[in-house]
Image (cartoon, rainbow, N blue to C red):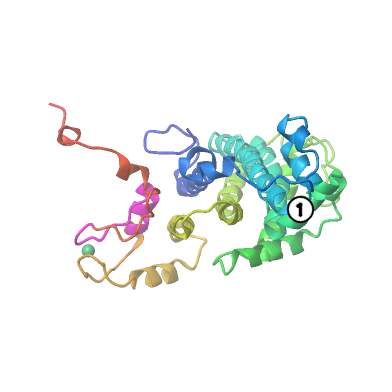
Amino acid sequence: MIYIDKDTKTVLPEKYHVAHNLCVQIYDMMLELHTNEIFNELYKSDFSFKIDENLKKVKEFTNKDIHALDWLAENGKHDILEKILCKRLLTSITGDLLNFLHEGLSCSMRGITNVAYANFRKPLKDSLTLLEMILVDPTDFTKTYFLNGDPNNYDPSSKNLNKEEIIEKALNKLGNKPLLNKEIIHILRFDKTNSNSFDPLSNLALHIVTRDRNYKTEDRNLNFIFSSKEDVEKQWEHIYFFMPYLMAYTFWIVDEILFSLVDLNKEIKEYRDLRVLLKFMYWACKHDKFNGSEQILSTLGKGGNCENCGAELDLGIHDLKLHFDTDLLPCVKCFHSLINFPEGYEPEFMSMKFNEDDFKKDE
Ligand SMILES: [Zn+2]
């Protein structure tokens, strides 16, 4: 378990618990692609068309002598090929990315920040770039990755790729997301000179000696080996100020691809959006470095009226906290949920069956 609750023993100072748990909750929402049945469509693909004399290698295909994707390519069925391939890539890349993020967050809460940085490198730099490329142009990616197949042309770490342009195009695909900014996302992941970037820190974590002029190992030193308590403090501060932002961005990229591949109620996507945004807002309001909290709270405070009892809504930080902890946002007058949960995607809590005994205190 990497979620920190009141019984968790951890060396992570309490001031970082909300940021840590925000990262874990966003991680959990991405993990739902693999665990929630509602996304099962990601794991299967049906296609049908008439078999006629124009189709090649039908016998090989029915005898399973040729892979379905190769057969589709052979027959020029590129649209079907693209959808199946992108589903496969999305589940596999996110699976790998989530494993690394989980390890990173687990190491961080145990104070092993050097290993945390090493674990954050691949998902933030490479895996996320692959996902951005798929989101930006799935047809082109299918061509480069599958039909052409030369790894030099889809290597996410290639210097030939214009990362800033990829981020910009990915952001355009996401529409007008509050918070997200091309320069910030680029600096945090790729800038070798900026002290806020994860790039030099994760490189130092992975290599004993580095020669890059921006973070050259000093004489008689070894990277990260002699880290003091103060160094770990500084690293926590960095991780927990920027990781929630990068986690939210990663989540939105994953969800945008996900909902382009599965035929699901758009309300589910909107609700997942809102869920991350409300949790992010709670963290931001709690953070002393963040100066937009008053604006968030005043916008939230004018939340309209409860559709059940008509009471004027006056939401504040306590409502954000309740939502952060439980996914629930009830009207304080009548307890009616202010969020319309999409059918089949209600919070886990609501599908649990309670009876009177559950609320009785032990004698
Ligand atoms: Zn009400």
Residue occupied by mark 1: 141
Q: Is residue 201 left or right of residue 31?
A: right
* Percent coordinates x, y for residue 349 in the rendering: 32, 43
At mark 1, the secondary structure is helix
- Residue at 71% over, 42% down: 122
* Above or below: residue 221 compared with residue 254: above
- Chain part drawn in magenta: 319-335
As for residue 320 lying within the magenta part, the answer is yes
As for residue 110 lying within the magenta part, the answer is no
Q: Could you say which quadrant of the image residue 164 lies in?
A: bottom right
**Outermost residue to the top:** 363
Q: Is residue 124 left or right of residue 336?
A: right
Q: Is mark 1 within 8 Å of ligand 1?
A: no
The residue lying toward the viewer, choosing from 229 and 190, is: 190
> Looking at the image, in which quadrant does ligand 1 appear?
bottom left
Rendered-image quadrant of the C terminus:
top left
**Outermost residue to the front:** 53
The residue lying toward the viewer, choosing from 194 and 244, is: 244
* Percent coordinates x, y for residue 212 in the rendering: 85, 48
* Above or below: residue 40 compared with residue 171: above
Mark 1 crowdedness (10 Å alpha carbons): few <14, some 14-19, many ≥20: many
Q: Is residue 120 left or right of residue 313?
A: right
Amino acid type of disc 1? Phe
